[in-house]
Amino acid sequence: MGSLYAGSKAVLLKGTTPEIILDAVSKEQCTIVWLLVPWTQDILAALDRGDIKLEDYKLDQWRLMHIGAQPVPPSLIRRWKQYFPHHKYDTNYGLSESTGPGCVHLGLDNIDKVGSIGIPGYRWSCKIVDESGNEVKQGEVGELCVKGPGVMTCYYNDPKATAETLKNGWLYTGDMAMQDEDGFYFLVDRKKDVVVSGGENIYPVQIENFLSAYEKVQDVAVIGLPDSRLGEITGAVIQVKDGMECTEEEINEYCQKLPRYKRPKKVIFAEVPRNATGKIEKPALRKKYGAEHLVAQQNLA
């Protein structure tokens, strides 16, 4: 919308391979590029392998890379800055019920807050609440609620869902978040994706961010798997970078840096499926690997 308001050019991609993206940026002289996490991962992997070379493109005018639609691993941006040290970085947070992104915004000058979605946007307010709707203390995890001019009126013909989502003008996002001492908000996970293991709440995104920093990991998804004793355990579905080999022992050794309760109890090497907007398709992963794990448990019993 910003480019339309300013009367500037917007380029629509015909595909999302690293070659197509960089070719479009080069030929159309793009200055701002909106990316999704998997596209960014693909570009970095192609650069690491030497499949593409930056000197083959005209990229001097590219000043800003922008990511949205899902939590962004800080390690991903650190790797990006190694190849593009002059790039500014930004991200927006929003959802369909808030008329898209913009209710929370990081800002170009907050690179030291990489991993955060930012602070409330213009005319927006945020709060984090517990299960009873009470605001939590700064630094504690709860559900992110937003209020502002873009909040929807209702879900069409669904008053029950509307009442569950809209309360006193606040939109309950279903995203778990925390606020740091500087007032910046960090997404922790989707409320429905939280793994409850032995009474302990485990937030998969935190583990995913940790594992994504490992040099052999291309992509990762952490899910809950049914467990007869603990209710659920964490399983890490890891997509290894092309041309590399990785073992469960390596992952377990790397995860020794995590608190014991956050260490994945099961490691699965497989492709991590993402939808068109770059979000991990966790329901499909839970359905596939949850069933397999349950069968394995029953066989052991």
Image: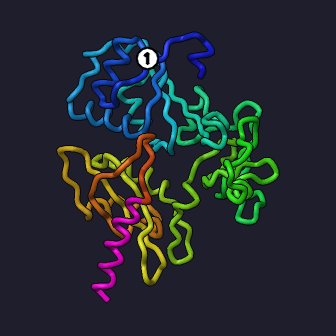
* Kind of residue at badge 1: Trp
- Mark 1 residue element: loop
Q: What residue occupies the far right of the structure in this picture? A: 168
In this orientation, which residue lies closer to the viewer: 86 or 125? 125
Image coordinates for residue 101, horizontal then vertical, percent: 60, 35
Q: Is residue 111 visible?
A: yes
In this orientation, which residue lies closer to the viewer: 56 or 78? 56
What main secondary structure does the magenta stretch of the protein show? helix
Q: In the image, is residue 156 above or below residue 284? A: above
Image coordinates for residue 276, horizontal then vertical, percent: 41, 41
- Please tell me how crowded label 1 is: few (under 14), some (14-19), or many (20+) other residues with Cα within 10 Å: some
Residue at 62% x, 55% y: name it. 174
- The residue segment tinted magenta is 284-301
Residue at 61% x, 36% y: name it. 100
Q: Is residue 291 left or right of residue 35?
A: left
Q: Is residue 33 left or right of residue 191?
A: left
Residue at 50% x, 44% y: name it. 70
Q: Could you tell me which quadrant the N terminus lies in?
A: top right
Image coordinates for residue 270, horizontal then vertical, percent: 27, 56
Q: Is residue 139 visible?
A: no
Residue at 74% x, 43% y: name it. 153
The answer to whether residue 6 is magenta is: no
Residue position marked by numbered label 1 in the rendering: 62
Q: Is residue 276 left or right of residue 103?
A: left
